Amino acid sequence: MNSIKEFFNKLPEKVSPEAIEGMETVFHFNFSGEEDGAHTVIIRDQKLEIQEGLQGEPECVISGKSENFLQVLNGKLNPMMALMTGKMKVSNTGTMMKYAKIFGVL
């Protein structure tokens, strides 16, 4: 993965409707650093939608430096180590764990 923008652009096509059947949630991703910015991931009606900015009431918020998130996506930084060392913050780890595999983060 070359950029966070690439991750969010490809995410809807990577997630099959069957994988998110019966699921409904909102995630906020908020990054600082080289690729600072905010994105909202909305899952409902077997669809995954990406919106620029922070929209709606999130069930989970993921934040940190964009460089660290890219390292997690590329397998260069263990997601659990990123959380334990404070390189990434997650407001609801239970929800993140539920969706991490679907998002391709684990």
Image (spheres, rainbow, N blue to C red):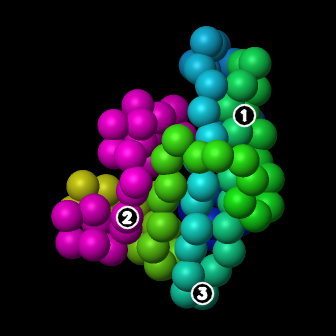
- What's the CA distance linking mark 3 and mark 2? 17 Å
- What's the CA distance linking mark 1 and mark 2? 22 Å
Location of mark 3 (residue): 34
Q: Select label 1 or label 2 by which is in front.
A: 2
Q: Select label 3 or label 2 by which is in front.
A: 2
Q: Which of the 4 quarters of the picture holds residue 91?
A: bottom left
- Regarding residue 30, the answer to whether it shows in the image is yes
| Residue 57 rendering spot, x and y as whole percentages | 64, 46
Q: Which of the 4 quarters of the picture holds residue 4?
A: bottom right
Q: Where does the N terminus fall, quadrant-wise?
A: bottom right
Q: Which of the 4 quarters of the picture holds residue 53?
A: bottom right
- Regarding residue 104, the answer to whether it shows in the image is no
Specify the segment rendered in magenta: 82-106
- Which label's residue is closer to the chain start, 1 or 3? 3
Location of mark 2 (residue): 89
Query: Please, is residue 37 above or below residue 93 in the view?
Result: below
